[in-house]
Amino acid sequence: MVSGDIAGLITVYVYVIILLFLSEKVLKKYPLISRKFLHIMVGNIFFILPLFDHAWVMAFVAAAPFIVLTFLVSPHSPLKLVSGTSAAGHGMGLVYYAISWTILAYVFFDRPEVIAVGIVAMSYGDGFASLVGSRYGKRKYDICGDVKSVEGSLAMMVMTVIVSAVALIYYGAPISIPVIGIVAVASAVVEALTPMGLDNLSVSLSAAFLYYALTYGV
């Protein structure tokens, strides 16, 4: 572990601690906003990825510990550290979030823009789908027992394209609107077909692997 890895670890942990404090203390009176604030803002971790020097540090020291930590602050935890109504009382969603980041960090360490696209689809895309759908969703549909809305799905596509483009610019990677457009549409379809909570796993992984396949022809 070298200075870059240490800087990356400190930045990740400090950033997540700040987010948890804001969601649990500042936004506690607004449960939906608090949960989605945490869900979306954690996605900004993609800005921190260049600090890391080794895949194993990013995957197993920065990302993997959050699998345990998020489980311990979930309603399923045997320790019952939080109430089910708190921002951290998220079910298993954030646990899947941490699992997907761990997988992406290890598999695509040398292609951080691919990790970023996966994280963006999960955080900004899925997060805004829920926010817009709950507030403006009029056209409802139910595919797998989980009610979604056309408005939410469209919001997911738009946000995935916009923030993915920002991520690619940040990494100096070529931007192909057709490619990120396909990834955005596919992510919305996967989100619609996945039972609640599991989309934090399915959306990020499918978005990253699809982007990688379309971009690098594998």
Image: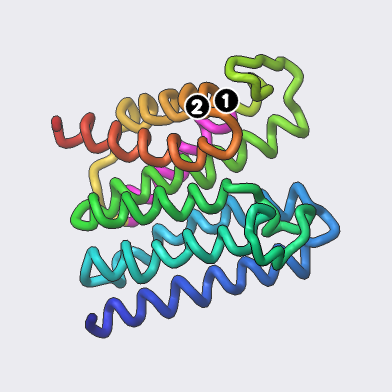
Q: Is residue 161 visible?
A: no
> Disc 1, disc 2: CB below 8 Å?
yes
Which residue position is annotated with label 1? 154
| Magenta span contains residue 137 | no
Which residue position is annotated with label 2? 188
Residue drawn at x 74%, y 33% as measured from the top left: 134
Q: Is residue 19 left or right of residue 201?
A: right
How far is disc 1 from disc 2 in space, using C-alphas? 8 Å
Compared with residue 203, is residue 88 higher up or lower down, i.e. above or below? below
Q: Position of residue 40 (x, y in %)?
A: 57, 51
Q: Is residue 56 left or right of residue 218?
A: right
Magenta stretch, overall SS: helix
Q: In this rendering, which labeled residue sits more in front, label 1 or label 2?
A: 2
Label 1 secondary element:
helix
Label 2 secondary element:
helix
Residue drawn at x 32%, y 25% as measured from the top left: 178
Q: Farthest residue toward the bottom?
A: 3
